[in-house]
Amino acid sequence: MEFGPDIQKVPKGFLCKLCDVKTPNEPSLDAHLKGKKHQHLCRLRAKREAQQESTVYVSGFQPDTSAGALEEYFQQFGPVAEVIMDKERGLYALVEFAETAGTKATLAQLQHCLNGLKLRVKPRERKNFKLASKERQNQTKPHISLEKLSFNLCLASSVNEQMQKMVEIFQLNENESKARQLLLDVLQEVFIEFLPDCQIVPFGSSVNTFGVHSCDLDLVLDLENTKAFQNHNRKCEQQGGDTQSEGGRSEDSILSDIDLTTASQDELLELVATILRKCTPGVFKVHAVNSARLPVVKFSHRQLNLQGDITINNRLAVRNTRFLQLCSGLDSRVRPLVYSVRFWAKQKQIAGNLSGGGPLLNNYALTLLVLFYLQSLSPPVLPSVEQLKEMACEEEQCVIDGWDCTFPSQPFRVPPSKNTDDLCTLLFGFFTYYSTLDFPGSVISLRAGRVLPITDFLSREEEMPDAAESSDATRQKTIRPKLGPVNILDPFELNHNVAGNLTERTHRNLRRELCEAEKYCRSSRYQRKSSKGKSWGIAKLFAPLLEGQDSAGKVPEISIAFRADTLTDSFRAELSSAGETFRVLWFKKVCSALEVVFKEILKCTPSDQVEILQDQAREEEVNNNNESLDSSSDQLAGPSGIKRPLSVEEGPSCSSSSPQGKRMKLEGSADRPEASHWIWTQRHLVWAGRRKIRRILLKTSDETSKPEGGCSSIESRVTQYIIENDPDPKEELKFSMDAVVAGSDDCTKAVLKFKATSDPAGHFQDFYHFLDCFLPKMVETLLAKSE
């Protein structure tokens, strides 16, 4: 395999210098080079190099020269694609031509003059394209070392004081708040010139009282008044009247080019990006993100060292911010608790998506978890949203996009809480509450102030008030929320699961860290200051997990989470009607899918079938009962992969049970089904090189490419290909697998525990790591098409 200039050989594999990605071997390197990220950066680099070839650097013009004047002058040499000016000082400009011929013609002319001044024109400086590393991206952000934070926290006299210090250390200071207000004023001034009567409204961490140093500035561009302004002017034009508004302002040319009422979201985002890019001082790195759930325009400000984003007409986000402000003002314990939980989650790597999107919890979801916990206490610290609605007066009624967003505008309208728990107790209670909560089997509702069963969301659609007929509170149907391993309903937009981005891996990590935190909070090291100067209280709680600490002595196990959104409609309806016993039906489907994966897709042999046949033969020889023998043989001729329930009545050493007793018992009204047991034998390395073989097979078929484990037919063909090319395996791997469903006081998932019973070649660990990624996805794929 030949490597290009982007690939560097390193001691433990290969380094892609373009993407700053390390790969351990040539197959993984080949997969990376064909991946979306590498291909995207290659195209981006080619685009940047082409722009450099077709761009000239221009200086020497007057500071008040406009981009239009420069474009008009250079049009004589060829079509001009874009003129980028230094807005702060007006000292230079970059003129990009649509074709390189325009660049050559411009540079061929020795002298250029504009408005009596001689221009200096030269080729644009060539720069090597390089992806900014995460370290470089975060260099501008203030960083508080964990060591320094721990030292400051340990100086406190109690956990309560430590949590108060968290607010003092991380909250936005006065200068940072002023900087954000200054940028907000500048943006308002710029945008109102092009979009009369528009409003730039802040929301999120900057203003919801939970902001931290260097947090992004989240903004909403409200265009409702601008639409009214535009419609008014157009009516005047149709009536032949003056085209000026009542304020004496004429409609700007931008509004003449675009109809805000019919414009698409992409057109509006591009309009915002253009105003930011060309007309706002200090703003750079402007780009629109159309693929986000709520499309945004992201930008940075050079002088203020701020990152921000602008969404359009997102009034629900502004209302959510007002709600968080209210909760913060209702009780002084809310902010310290939120700051502490957020920092803990970030340290444990279960929150903090670096690029915005990702599989981790975001700050908003974490804040809602804290608020819901405070609602669930007895007596509660915070009231539910429904209770807040009853406390609001008539003037505070609010409906946005059909959702009832009513709550009091001021904290004094809400009676104070009768709960007297201190911060130390509340933080301990937070970890205790969520470490035992069945996240996949529950839906957290701040509106109701209680946990709703997942079965309520499986077969019916949620309802919302119709804003158009709010007088009779008519209900209309809408899309149910996206269900996942963790379900947290937005307080107002009831079809939005704010934790819908979480994966099963994130959920497992969340549960593990919650249990570890709950365990630590029971110790004296959490509750009392160390007399020997050791880390204590929340300072010890924030300590990162040491490498290898989690895996020490861990039994190999894989979890298959209950995910309602991947099931068929008919199966969801069946589970919904089953109520609390839905886990029994779901686990039965999972066990059937597991048999299909191991026997039909991975071609494992159910070796316990031979053992049970031998036991049965010995029993029948003693009884000498031919009729019983025939009956038993019929039973053993059923589905392969015979399972043995590990029940209390029958231990592993029990050998006198009948074959019928060895079958898994799922028919019952219990909330949980019994455990199941398999012993499998694998004679081929079916996990080695699967991705490469899949790509080869897909090239010769009409099937579309899917992620590993996304198609049962493709995966079966991959396994068959591996077996055909390995006709004489030398060693075999025998392993046992126990399955049990966890629910109620844990979380709804099937836990599979593995144990190698015979592994002479030492293949078990590699096979287990393959199954950890492959098995949950494959079972999910089978359940998605199972009836």
Image (spheres, helix red, strand yellow):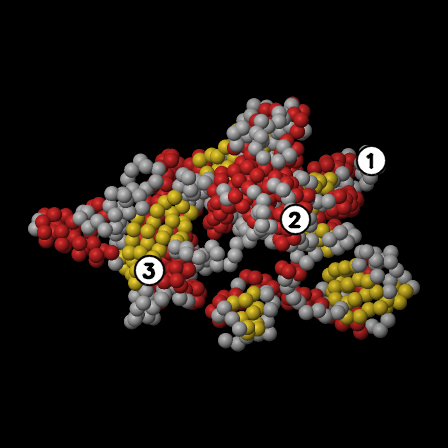
Q: Nearer the viewer, residue 214 or 243?
A: 214
Measured in 3D between alpha carbons, the distance from the residue under mark 3 to the one under mark 1, in whole angstroms, is: 81 Å
**Left or right: residue 291 compared with residue 310:** left
**Spot occupied by residue 414 in the image (x, y as percentages of width and height):** 63, 26
The residue positioned 59% from the left and 62% from the top of the image is: 40
- Return the residue found at the far bottom: 2
Q: Residues within 10 Å of mark 1 (few under 14, many from 20)?
A: few
Does label 3 or label 1 sit earlier along the sequence? 1
625 to 401, vertically: above or below = below
Does label 3 or label 2 sit earlier along the sequence? 2
- Return the residue found at the far right: 116
**Left or right: residue 130 compared with residue 556:** right
Task: From the image, tell me which residue sits under label 2.
Answer: 152
Does residue 590 appear in the picture of this structure? yes
Task: From the image, tell me which residue sits under label 3.
Answer: 756
The residue positioned 53% from the left and 63% from the top of the image is: 35
Q: Nearer the viewer, residue 650 or 104?
A: 650
The quadrant of the picture occupied by the C terminus is top left
